[in-house]
Amino acid sequence: MAITDDLRKTLSDPTPLYFAAGTADLAFQQAKKVPALVEQLRAEAPARIEAVRNTDPKAVQEKAAARAKEAQETLQTKVNDFLGTLDVDLKKLGEQAQDLALRGVGVAAEYAVKARETYEKVAEHGEQAVKSWRGEAAEEIEDFAIAVEGRPEPAEAQGEPKPVVAEPAADSKPVAKKAPAPRKTTTAKKTTPPAK
């Protein structure tokens, strides 16, 4: 029975769909920026092409050789420093390996938490995007306003004054009061909070 409940809960959870909608909405927003970037590249391209044409191949080759030699010297120095400071004590190396493994687990847990937070943010963005696509945001605001202010009486809502009923005199018969119009009830939409 628990498996059925878990399966039902998993299949009825809209968070992955909201995540997909949020991703699509963010991608669409980024895609809107592409034409401006293309125009910028189109404007800058002639200057860059001209700069490449005017560059001397020998100068580029000399710069690359100098950078490669510098990188090789730096790497050789760092390797020599590392080998010189390497501690051969196996116990210390074992402690360091254990410490690194624990740090790795901590970092992995931290990344998992950050990934979950990002997933929830994108899913929340997707939920808002879906609501705006459907026009539900305005309905929720209206429902919220009604909940805060209270629903007006039907007579007041139509601009009609309330019927005034005179108090019966002590010696007259009681006057039958008119029953109030039945209130219209609306069903509130049930929203599920994002899974935590």
Image (cartoon, rainbow, N blue to C red):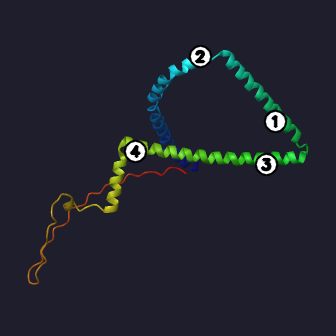
Query: Quarter of the image holding residue 146?
Result: bottom left
Q: CA distance from mark 1 to mark 2?
A: 37 Å
Q: Which mark is residue 131?
A: 4
| Mark toward the start of the polypeptide (3 vs 1) | 1
Q: Amino acid at mark 4?
A: Lys
Q: Which label belongs to residue 78?
A: 1
Write down the residue under mark 3.
Answer: 99
Amino acid on which the number 2 mark rests in the picture: Asn
Q: Are marks 3 and 4 in contact (CB under 8 Å)?
A: no
Q: At 64% across and 45% down in the image, what residue appears?
A: 111
Residue 106, horizontal then vertical, whole percent: 70, 49
The amino acid sitting under disc 1 is Lys
* Left/right of residue 73 with respect to residue 167 in the rendered view: right
Of circles 3 and 1, which is in front? 1
| SS under mark 1 | helix
Q: Circle 2 sits in a helix, a strand or a loop, which is it?
A: helix
